[in-house]
Amino acid sequence: MKRIMCYGDSLTWGYRAHSDGAPPTRFAPGARWTGVLADRVRDFAVVVEEGLSGRTTDLEDPEAPYRNGAAFLPVALRTHTPIDLVVLMLGTNDTKAVFRRSGLDIAVSLAGMVRTIQSFTGPDAAGAAPPQVLLVCPPPICPDADGWIDRIFAGANDRIGALSAALAAFAEGRGIDLVDAGQLLVTGGVDGVHFDEANNRVLGEAVAEEATRLLT
C-alpha cells in the first residue's frame, strides 16, 4: 500500500467552528477532507493526518508555540516514513496581519518545505525514494467584518490572492502538482476562516483525484 501524509494546519486537522460561541470541535474522521481522501484511495493507499491548528510555514506565532511547520516537517517525515506522497497545505496562518508577509514571502517558504520533502531519503527514510509532493493553495477567507478574527486576518485575501499566483508559477516552473482550493470552494465555516462539511468533501475529492493520478 502507498502512504500519503497530509501536512497542514487547522484545515487539515478538521477544525469545526460553532456559531454559538462554543469552543471549536473536530469534524469526525470521515467528514474531514483527509477522511474523504482516505475513503477514495483506500484500495491502494493509506492516509496519515499531520494537521495542527495555527501551524505556519516557518514562523513562530506569538500567540501559540510549536506552530513552525518547517521546523517540525523533518520530524513528521521521519515519524511516518516510508511516505509516497506529501499533500502540503499551509499559508492561511501566514496571512495574519501581525506577520506582515506578502504572498510571495509565503510561497518562498513553501518552496523551502518542498525542497525538504524532495530531499528526504536515505537511512532515516527507511531507504525509500523521496516522496512526491502535491501542493494545495488555501482558499480566500470571509470572516465577519469588525470582529477579532477579521482584525487578525486584515488584508489576508490580498495575500492569499498573491500566494495563489506565486504558487502557480512555482508549480509550473518546478514541475510540482498544485490544487488551488480557491478555484474549488468558498470557505463556509461559521467563522469565515475554517471549512464546513461541504468544503471538506469538495477538497477531499479533488485531492483524491490528483493522488490517484500520481500514485497509480
Image (cartoon, rainbow, N blue to C red):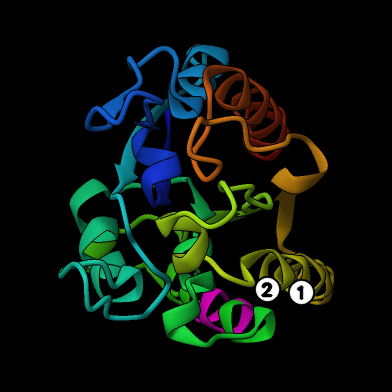
Q: In this rendering, is residue 168 above or below 43?
A: below
Considering the numbered disc 2 on the image, is that residue within a helix, a strand or a loop? helix
Left or right? Give the position of 142 relative to 46. Answer: right
Q: Position of residue 30 (x, y in %)?
A: 41, 12
User: Toward the viewer: 81 or 66?
Assistant: 66
Q: Which residue is mark 1?
A: 162
Q: In this rendering, is residue 167 above or below 190?
A: below
Label 1 neighbour load within 10 Å: few <14, some 14-19, many 20+: some
The reply to whether discs 2 and 1 touch (Cβ–Cβ < 8 Å) is yes
The type of residue carrying mark 1 is Ala
- By secondary structure, the bulk of the magenta-drawn segment is best described as helix
Report the number of numbered marks: 2
Task: Identify the disc placed on residue 159.
Answer: 2
Which residue is rendered at x = 24% and y = 68% of the image? 72
Numbered range of the magenta stretch: 107-112
Q: Position of residue 149 (x, y in %)?
A: 44, 56
Instruction: Give the quarter of the figure containing the C terminus.
Output: top right
Residue farthest to the front, as pictured: 146
Considering the numbered disc 1 on the image, is that residue within a helix, a strand or a loop? helix
The type of residue carrying mark 2 is Arg
